[in-house]
Amino acid sequence: MDSPRRILLVEDEPDIAEMLRFFLEQNGYVLLHAENGQEALRLTHEKMPHLILMDGILPDMDGFEVCQHLRAMPATAHIPIIFLTRRSGHDNVLAALELGADDFIAKPFDPEEMLLRIQNTLRRAEKSARIDLQTGLPGAQIARDYVAQARQDSSLAIIEIQIAHNVPYRQRYGKVAMNNVYGRLGQLVVSMLGQSDIARTFAGYVSENHLAVVYPVAGAENFARQVAVSFNKIIGKFYQDTDRERGYVEIGGERSPLMQVICRVYLGRSGAAAGRSRGPR
């Protein structure tokens, strides 16, 4: 099956958090938990959840303020947000929707209804190409639009990341295994971007095997090299021992090399290729 969807619960009431953790994990989700707004912002950038359940009242900042921060950042603006709060008045609902929230659930709530709303919200986001459900990264439409804008900025570089020899791997191991590889690559990139200037970075899948990263020109080539080196070091983990030890897969009598991540760096407005990184084999 595909990688489980990550849900970030921003909730400072322990009883509610524990109940939702048990319920959502029983239904196949991975639950991340933040007790306050600052922790929610940090976890969002580090883990890139597929959806956020946001309490409106938090110890350090208003949930609406957290939503506003996330919507203002290109790297997180795509993430669906459902408010889960006791402040259910008409004005609060409108305020949440105006900030870009996708839904609003009043406490106390029915867990089964909440589950349906989560499923419907994710389905809409995927259908509109707003989110790539395998990785949690922005989907094709958002990624293409943002990359097109970034190409006009001479201070930004576009890093195109692809996996070479992916077709033989898919033929040998299947679509689900290939999706897991894409998911792992996406998680690696998100983790590395979490250590950067988050206001100036972005990552999204513009197509199945085409991950685009927007990064400041000064550090783009080094970032691309680190991605290639880091991922190519673990690529063997996706293969069975026999294929990994001999260094190739054999399909129909033909040998194909193991997969390899290739990164190409293009400089902002000029569109010139700055370099290509493969990493060690």
Image (spheres, grey):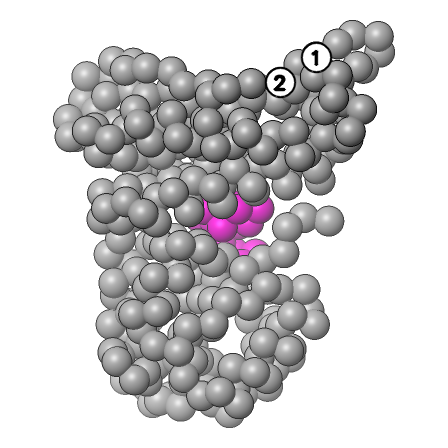
Residue at screen point 30% across, 60% down: 70
Q: Amino acid at mark 2?
A: His
Magenta run includes residue 132: yes
Residue at left 84%, top 11%? 252
Disc 2: which residue: 165
Pinpoint residue 169: horizontal percent, then vertical percent: 70, 24
Q: Is residue 189 left or right of residue 119?
A: left
Please, what is the three-letter code of the amino acid marked with disc 1?
Answer: Ser
Q: Which residue is mark 1?
A: 256
Find the magenta span and give its range: 122-139
Given residues 273 and 280, the one toward you in this image is 280
Residue 130 vs 223, above or below: the answer is below
Q: Kindly check if marks 2 and 1 are in contact, taking CB atoms under 8 A apart as contact.
A: yes
* Residue 281 quadrant: top right
Q: Disc 2 and disc 1: Cα gap in Å?
A: 7 Å
Q: Position of residue 20 (x, y in %)?
A: 57, 79
User: Label 1 neighbourhood size at 10 Å, few (<14), some (14-19), many (20+)?
Assistant: some
Quadrant of the rendered structure where residue 91 is?
A: bottom left
Q: Judge by depth and name the residue closer to the eye, 126 or 24.
A: 24
Q: Earlier in the sequence, mark 2 or mark 1?
A: 2
Q: Main secondary structure of the magenta part?
A: loop
| Element class at badge 1 | strand
Q: Secondary structure at mark 2?
A: loop
Percent position (x, y) of residue 278? 46, 18
Inspect this view and state whether residue 127 appears: no
Q: Residue furthest top?
A: 254
Q: Quadrant of residue 236?
A: top right
Residue in view at x 49 percent, y 50 percent: 136
